[in-house]
């Protein structure tokens, strides 16, 4: 991601991963329009939406929580109004960043664990444990 951000003249970037359409309502989703995105490639993001229904989602590219962002996003976050679930969502600030400065999506093929769910949390612990012979 860092190499892509530097090559793209300092544009900000976020990692995304494809999920099945029945899971999009659990994540922030990146709208890349008709752009073709390949692993470790990057494309401009047109917009972001937090936890859309499968019928209203622009894609199945989920935001993974890996970001390269400018410090100005803090000011944008401070001005962001509460969204889904009554929470202030980073997705809202990122959507504003897209309008002002642009934002790139970088698709990864890394092993991802959603630790907001029991299965993901357990999977992450098992993956780390497997790497350590003592565990």
Image: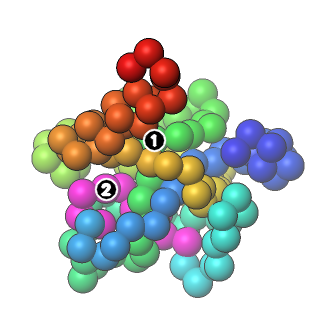
Residue 65 numbered tag: 1
Q: Nearer the viewer, residue 117 or 78?
A: 117
Q: Which quarter shows the C terminus?
A: top left
Residue 122 rendering spot, x and y as whole percentages:
26, 37
Q: Residue at x 65, y 79 (%)?
A: 36
Report the side of 31 relative to 28 (left or right). Answer: right
Residue lying at the far left of the rendered structure: 85
Q: Nearer the viewer, residue 86 or 37?
A: 37
Residue lying at the far top of the rendered structure: 134
Secondary structure type for disc 2: loop
The answer to whether any part of residue 19 appears in the image is yes
Q: Residue at x 34, y 31 (%)?
A: 125
Report the side of 2 relative to 33 (left or right). Answer: right
Residue 81 numbered tag: none
Instruction: Examine the rendered structure and indicate whether residue 126 appears above or below residue 43.
Output: above
Residue 27 belongs to magenta span = yes
The colour scheme of the drawn protein is rainbow
Residue 114 rendering spot, x and y as whole percentages:
32, 45
On the image, numbered disc 2 is attached to which residue?
27
Residue 85 rendering spot, x and y as whole percentages:
13, 47
Instruction: Examine the rendered structure and indicate whether residue 83 appears above or below residue 46.
Output: above
Q: Which residues are magenta?
A: 24-32
Q: Residue at x 44, y 48 (%)?
A: 112
Q: Is there CB contact under 8 Å for labels 2 and 1?
A: no
Crowding near the residue tagged with mark 1, few <14, some 14–19, many ≥20 C-alpha atoms within 10 Å:
few
């Amino acid at each position: 991601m860092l190499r892509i951000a530097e090559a793209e003249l300092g544009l900000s970037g976020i990692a995304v991963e494809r999920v099945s359409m029945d899971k999009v309502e659990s994540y922030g989703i990146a709208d890349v329009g008709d752009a073709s995105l390949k692993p470790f490639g990057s494309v401009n993001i047109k917009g972001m939406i937090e936890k859309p229904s499968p019928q209203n989602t622009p894609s199945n590219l989920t935001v993974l929580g890996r970001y390269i962002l400018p410090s100005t996003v803090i000011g944008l976050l401070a001005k962001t109004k509460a969204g889904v679930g009554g929470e202030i969502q980073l997705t809202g600030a990122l959507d504003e960043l897209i309008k002002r400065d642009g934002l790139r999506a970088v698709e990864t093929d890394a092993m991802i664990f959603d630790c907001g769910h029991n299965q993901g949390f357990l999977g992450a612990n098992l993956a780390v444990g497997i790497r350590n012979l003592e565990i």
